[in-house]
Every structure is written in structure tokens, then in C-alpha cells.
Image: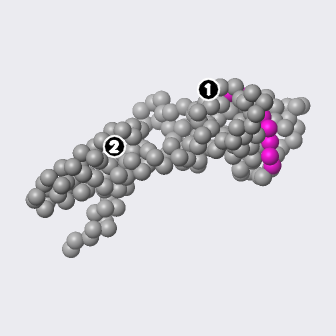
Amino acid sequence: MYRPFLFAAVFFLSGVGAGSFIRNLWVFLSLALLCLIILFLIKKKRIRAAFVGLLIFFTGALYYNLRADGIAGTIVKYAGKQRSVIGMVNDSPTIESDRVRYDIKALYIIENNTYQKVSGRIFLSVPRDEKNRRVFRYGDVVKFSGRLKLPQEKRNPGGMDYRASLLQKGISTTMFSREIE
């Protein structure tokens, strides 16, 4: 029995999986175009079906790479720089004995005394001390300063990929700030 949806779903999902490991948009785009060209040149049905499968596979990989870049938002271009950010607390904070961690939806970056509208989310860590007694709640608008960083990628084979883990939650950058207001 021929099941075209299952055929497409298997190739697309395996392409999404490959796209999560190989983060090069141009490789998948050029391979998809090559498959498309070959598809029009081949006459045999079985070989055409194989190239349709490959085309769907590369489309899945392209989808993942484009989607991951869209999730990251514009905040990523400020990574590695000291910035002041205005954002909204996006989730309940994680309270630990020595720090509070917030999921912040970035709204603005203050650059040269002007407000630049940005998108993306920041995983913010703030120490619990005399300056930071107040714990902010979901929906509170806050201002903080620090160095925006991209989370570390997987460093050990088979180990956890911290960047991918946060990106699956929609968080693309991290920051440590001494003070939040």
C-alpha cells in the first residue's frame, strides 16, 4: 500500500533532525536545488521518488535552520557586548539560594541614549543580595545591564547542548547582571 504522507513525513522529520546537527543553511539550500534540478532530468519513477525524498529531506533541514534563526530574534546580534536592556519577565523566576534566574522577553536595547527595538529572549541571572531583594514576577517590565552572551554549545561528545536546550525554549542569549530594576 502506498502512503505518500508517511513517505513525506519520514523524510521531512529526518531532515529536521539532520538540520539540528548541521547548522549550515547554504549546504542544505544548494543540495535542495541540486535535487530539484536532477528531479527534472530523471525519467525513471523509482529514481525520481528517491530524489523527491531527498528534496523533502533537505526541505526539513532548511526549515529547521530558518526556524532556529527566527526564534533567536534580533537580540543575538548584540551578543558579546555590554548592553542595557529593557524587557518583560516572560515566566516565573527560578529562585535559588544565591541567585534568581529570569526568562526575559527583550523589548529594547539602550544604545547611545536611544532605544532600539529588539526581539528575542534572554536567560538572566541576578545575585540575591542587598541590592536585589525584590523578586520580579511574570509580566513585570525590568531594566538591567550586563554582557549578552550566546550559550555554550555541546563541548563533549554525547554531552548536553546547552544552546540547543535553551533555543528549544525560545531563549537565544544569556546575561549576568549585578542589578535589576
| Mark 1 or mark 2, earlier in chain | 2
Q: Is residue 177 visible?
A: no
Query: Is 165 rendered above or below residue 110?
Result: below
Q: Which residue is pictured at 54% across the width and 38% down the height? A: 163
- Per the rendering, the mark at residue 35 is none
Q: Which residues are magenta?
A: 140-147
Residue 5 pos. (x, y %)? 32, 67
Q: Quadrant of residue 13?
A: bottom left
Q: Which residue is pictured at 79% across the width and 38% down the height? A: 143
Amino acid carrying label 2: it is Phe
Of residues 128 and 3, the one drawn nearer to the viewer in this rendering: 3
Dot 1 corresponds to which residue? 80
- Per the rendering, the mark at residue 28 is 2
Residue 150 pos. (x, y %)? 58, 32
Residue 131 pos. (x, y %)? 88, 31
Q: Classify 10 Å Cα crowding around label 1: few (below 14), some (14-19), many (20 and above).
A: some
Give the main secondary structure of the magenta stretch: strand
Of residues 39 and 56, the one drawn nearer to the viewer in this rendering: 39
Query: Is 83 rendered above or below residue 63?
Result: above
Amino acid carrying label 1: it is Gly
Query: Is 28 rendered above or below residue 12?
Result: above
> Number of callouts in the render?
2
Which quadrant of the figure contains the N terminus?
Answer: bottom left
